[in-house]
Image (cartoon, helix red, strand yellow):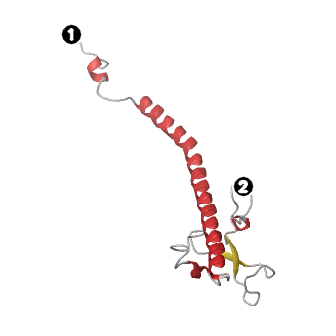
Amino acid sequence: MKFRSRRSPKFRDRGFTLIEMVIVISLVLILLAIALPRYDQTITRAREAKLHENLSTLNKAIEEYSLDKKKAPQSLDELVPGYVKFIPEDITGGNTWQTEPEDSQDAWDPNQPGIGSVHSGSDEISTRGDAYSSWKQ
């Protein structure tokens, strides 16, 4: 009569041991701990790039409007029909743009100065260390 051991090859093929599972799960958690901060940093940089592009688009549209109409726009909504399809969102996710009046000495119409430029209304700090509201273009 032959005695069968529980450690036969057939028994071993049925699954993983607990220690093997713990090692694999630990490795996955270590990789996630490395990857998640990089992912957050990438998302922040993408938002900043989008803000830079939106600032450039809006300020260029203000300049084109002023050159075409020989006067500065009084609000950002005046840009929508022909210079931009829509007013893009600020980095905060809303329409919190802050407008600056045009310089009175260089104004098209000194009696009715309009918008000279636009900047973000966010007080958040960028990855460069300055406030988004200080970005001009």
Q: Earlier in the sequence, mark 2 or mark 1?
A: 1
Report which quarter residue 15 is drawn in.
top left
Residue 11 tag number: none
Q: Residues within 10 Å of mark 1 (few under 14, many from 20)?
A: few
Q: Residue furthest right?
A: 105
- Residue at image position (54%, 38%) is 30
Quadrant (top left/top right/bottom left/bottom right) for the N terminus: top left
Residue 128 tag number: 2
The picture places residue 115, in percent across and down from the top left corner, at 69, 79
In the rendered structure, the answer to whether residue 119 lies left or right of residue 39 reads right
- Pick whichever, 82 or 40, lies toward us: 82
Provide the residue designation for mark 1: 2
The picture places residue 10, in percent across and down from the top left corner, at 26, 20
Q: Residue furthest left?
A: 1
* In the image, residue 51 above or below residue 102: above
Do the numbered discs 2 and 1 sit on residues whose CB atoms are within 8 Å?
no
The picture places residue 74, in percent across and down from the top left corner, at 65, 84
- Pick whichever, 129 or 72, lies toward us: 72
Q: Amino acid at mark 1?
A: Lys
Report which quarter residue 79 is drawn in.
bottom right
* In the image, residue 33 above or below residue 130: above
Dot 1 falls on a residue whose secondary structure is: loop
